[in-house]
Amino acid sequence: MNPWESQAMAHNFPSDPSPAVGKNQSTHSRLQSRQDPIIYPGLYAPSGVDIMTVLFSVFARPDPKIELGPVDCSAALTVSNLDLPGSPIIYANEAFAKLTGYTIKEVVGKNSQFLHSPQSKASSQSSLLDQQVAAIQQLDHAAAARDEIQLYITNYKKNGQKFTNLLSMIPIRLPDDETQYSVGFHVAAD
């Protein structure tokens, strides 16, 4: 057992967690200001991205156009910041790393277009098939319009192996955050 687990197991919760509350103090604000000794910064989100809030935002989005079905943190996913130039990936999980062969450190900060061509070849539109170019244009258009999209696209793993990616891209805003993000769900379809 690690030190924070030991501390959590030894913690004694008070039988009445709410001390006397003044008439001007609401229960909601009292709960927000209270420090929980079991919650440790970075324990559940060492990347700095709260993936549970991201997934909840995807689940609770208004007017969904794409039916994702059950989704959890085992899905290969990326989060990109659409408000930054090039819409860089700010989060990728281990399932994405396993699917593509890239480490998380290798993909964070990059635009996801690196998946469109093998690493050994120059990434040029002229070397891609017309169908691939059309899919890339659809993705670019959906990102610019902040619209949901789901499509099959040919991607390449780090080792150059081609795979068909069923990509679902869902734009979201997180609570109390004006930044526009895009959550990408990646599934190898072959």
Image (tube, rainbow, N blue to C red):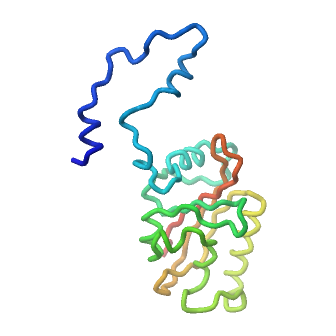
The residue lying toward the viewer, choosing from 126 and 149, is 126
Residue at the (54%, 49%) spot, across then down = 55
Tell me which residue sits at (61%, 80%) in the image. 116
Q: Measuring from the top left, give residue 78's x and y in whole percent.
A: 55, 62
Using the image as rendered, state which of residue 159 and residue 168 is in the foreground: 159
**In terms of image quadrants, where is residue 149?**
bottom right
In this rendering, the answer to whether 150 lies above or below 127 is above
Where is residue 2 shown, x and y percent of the image?
A: 25, 48
Q: Position of residue 132 (x, y in %)?
A: 67, 81
| Residue found at x 58% / y 62% | 90
Name of the residue lying farthest toward the left: 1
Q: Taking 49 as reference, is 121 above or below it?
A: below
Total number of numbered discs in the rendering: 0
Q: Residue at x 66, y 51 (%)?
A: 172
Q: Observer-nearest residue: 190 or 101?
A: 101
User: Which of the 4 image quarters holds residue 125?
Assistant: bottom right
Residue that extends furthest to the top in the rendered view of this protein: 23
Tell whether 49 sits left or right of 80.
Answer: left
Q: Is residue 162 left or right of residue 12?
A: right
Residue 104 in the image, given as x and y percentages of width and height: 47, 69
Horizontal side of 177 relative to 25 (left or right) equals: right
